[in-house]
Amino acid sequence: MTVSGREPEDMLYFQALSFVVGGTEEEARRKAAEIDEFASSEGYAALLSGVIGIDLSRYDLEAPISEVEKWQGEHVLKGMIDAAPDKSWKLGDVLGLIADLRVVGTPEQIADVLQTYADVGVDGINVQYHTTPGSFEDFIDGVTPVLQERGLQQREYRPGTLREKLFDGRFGDRLSDRHRAAAYRRR
């Protein structure tokens, strides 16, 4: 089955996730609670507006999503609303859940979660942050060694372009000839 003119073997799937890492589960939960003190529906709406191309500031973020369903012309927004398990949630709460897909725990607990993503075919993780450089440092110092020990993250990179590394050299340093953008290569 092709997707947007591409074969499944020509695509990789990377899940965007943020991580709150603690030496103990209690420490991780404390850090997550601290992050939540600064979170806002308006901030999540601004972030997602840029990602999905819909100006979410025109919607009432305090409205129950059951009332938001009248905006069915916005297909991406409708998909988010349809996916919410509880229609009494506020729109801002749903946006927060989507904008901040977060894994909280010890390095071992986080590695367990990432193993489940790998088991279902996710090709990689796009690590998002809450604080910089803190979120990245916590992940690199705490989670990376556990992932490497389990064989879920490489220790060294082979030479070549990013495309060659991601696709294990299958297509060389260019898009697959099957990709429709390949028609626009300079000859």
Image: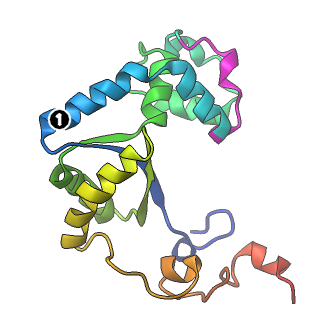
The image quadrant where one finds the C terminus is bottom right
Which residue: 57% across, 75% down? 10
- Mark 1, residue position: 27
The amino acid sitting under disc 1 is Glu
Residue 96 appears in the picture as rendered: yes
Q: Residue 33: x, y in percent?
A: 28, 25
Residue closest to the eye, 113 or 139: 139
Which residue: 59% across, 33% down? 47
**Region rendered in magenta:** 51-61
Q: Does the magenta stretch include residue 120?
A: no
Label 1, secondary structure: give it. Answer: helix
> Is 56 left or right of 129, judged from the image as shown?
right
- Dot 1 alpha-carbon crowd within 10 angstroms: few under 14, some 14 to 19, many 20 or more: some
Q: Quadrant of residue 160?
A: bottom right
168 to 92, vertically: above or below:
below
Which residue: 25% across, 71% down? 148
Residue closest to the eye, 108 or 117: 108
